[in-house]
Amino acid sequence: MIPTKEIQIRIRNLHKTFPLDKRLLGGYRGQLEVLKGVDLDIRRGEIFGVVGFSGAGKSTLVRCINRLEEPDRGTVHIDGVDITSLSKKNLNAERRKIGMIFQTFNLFESKTVYGNVAYALSLSGEKLSGEEKDRRVTEMLELVGLTDKRFAYPGELSGGQKQRVGIARALINHPQVLLSDEATSALDPQTTLSVLDLLKSISEKLGLTIILITHELEVIRYACDRMAILEEGEIREQGSVRDVFLNPNSVTGKIFLKVNANFQKNSWFEEGGDGI
Amino acid sequence: MSLFKNSFWTVFLHSFSKEIWDKMWPAIGSTFYMVSISAIFVLIFGTIIGIILAATRKTGLVPSLFPANVVLSGTVNILRSLPEMIMIIVMLPLARLITGQSYGSNACIIALVASCVPMFSRLVESILLGIDKGKIEAAKAMGSGNFKILFEVMVPETFPALIRAYSVALIALISMTALAGNFGAGGIGDLAVRYGFSRFQHDILFATIYALVIMVMGVQFIADLFARVISKKWHII
């Protein structure tokens, strides 16, 4: 699906502060302001990248969207529903419409690949017959290319396969949004590409909106339609990947681009280098 | 046969004689009875209390129930600070109330359970707290309720560790049961004290040691086997 102009996720003035209490260790008591009023609009069906250095607040931002962290102030609207004001029960129902994948995969080691996906399906609240369940799980495993691993345990899988299980588990309840918290950061470049290809094809096929948190510029360039740069808890730049890449204004953006350019300029092979 | 009159070798050989083991088998049966009944109670109550302790912490799944944690945790601490010997004496009135007599195997089981449940529940608590936070977050992000997270994620994910903790509790139960023998509960501990200590019949003392060692090793072996088979199946070792 080609991204439309319709805004699906509207984040306004999002604040999050973590209390710091180090008095026991002879330190001080204070606050760590991680998000300082974040505004973001994310369109339906796009892959939206958020980059930033460690500690910039990327993870906190994405975890505020499904309220794994409670934001102090501000609102998150998804399809017109205000996530920040939902009651606990409604939040659980809403969370089923927001898939999430993680850097460390977080699969259940005691369940098979099939079991992991079936667990997520069992939360849907629909009354499904055994055959219906089986059909849905099998379909999903086909989509992520893990049909032959259905009875394997996560301990037997490679990193890329584990992330595919994570994706299957996140998508089984037909969410409209997928949050990816550094999902490719633990994978090698080749596996990263294959996982990104999968995410791109799923986004196109299902019209899924994906928010990709990453510190790898390559990931953004390869997969994203639009991006934002997060720096010290604030959005410094926002726009199409092309625009931000061609003309970065923020410190983070310039550093990212400089590192990238130096990489290409100083390539060992081109200069002859020391050789390895 | 005493070590004071006979050589070690004679006493050792005699500890395998039929005469000794005719006394031993009923005692072993009685110990086995006490341990297995207590074990069932410890498993049930210890698991439940351990789960409540882990879930109601301030950083746990239901922090709103923190007052319950304070009360429960305090009770557990008080019970844990009583040594088994004192626990038996303290529990005598309760035992009389429930079983109608303050001596014997059944009366003793109450003290055993009261001693071992708090210990096992702390073990369960610490194992549940040790689970990878990411797994709980993943379950939360999927929209799981607390009940489902507890019983379909936390408990199954930590199952091999829970089995090992249970073996620790079972072995503690066996040693507590031996002590309870001193208070009219019968069993292996009773034999060791009455014959081995009071009458210097060291051959019986030896026999009680064999029985206890074999029981403890058996429990440990079975628990290790279970935990290892499950871990192997999940490919986490």
Image: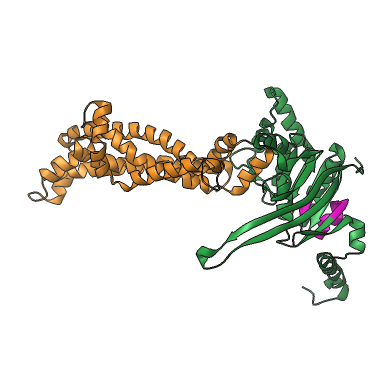
Chain colours: A green, B orange
Question: Is B52 positioned to the left or the right of A169 in the image?
Answer: left
Q: Report the residue at 82% width, 76% height from top.
A: A273
Say which of A186 and A240 sits in front.
Answer: A240
Q: Position of residue B107 (x, y in %)?
A: 25, 31
What's the residue at 64%, 40% (across, down)? B139
**Magenta stretch holds residue B199:** no
Q: Report the side of B140 relative to B60 (left or right).
A: right
Locate residue A117 relative to residue B51 in the image: left or right: right
- In this orientation, does residue B5 appear? yes
Question: Percent position (x, y) of residue B214?
Answer: 31, 42
**Measuring 55% from the left and 43% from the top, which residue is drawn there?**
B63
Q: Which residues are magenta?
A: A212-227
Residue A182 can be seen, yes or no? no
Looking at the image, the residue that sits furthest to the left is B5
In which quadrant of the rendered view does residue A244 lie?
bottom right
Q: Is residue B33 left or right of residue B132?
A: left
| Residue A218 is a magenta residue | yes
Position of the N terminus of chain B by quadrant: top left
Residue furthest front in the image: A73
The mark tally for this picture is 0
Residue at screen point 77% across, 34% down: A174
Residue B22 placed where, x, y %? 18, 32
Q: Nearer the viewer, residue B229 or A101?
A: A101
Q: Position of residue B58 (x, y in %)?
A: 53, 47
Between residue A118 and residue B67, name the one nearer to us: B67
Q: Quadrant of residue B235?
A: top right
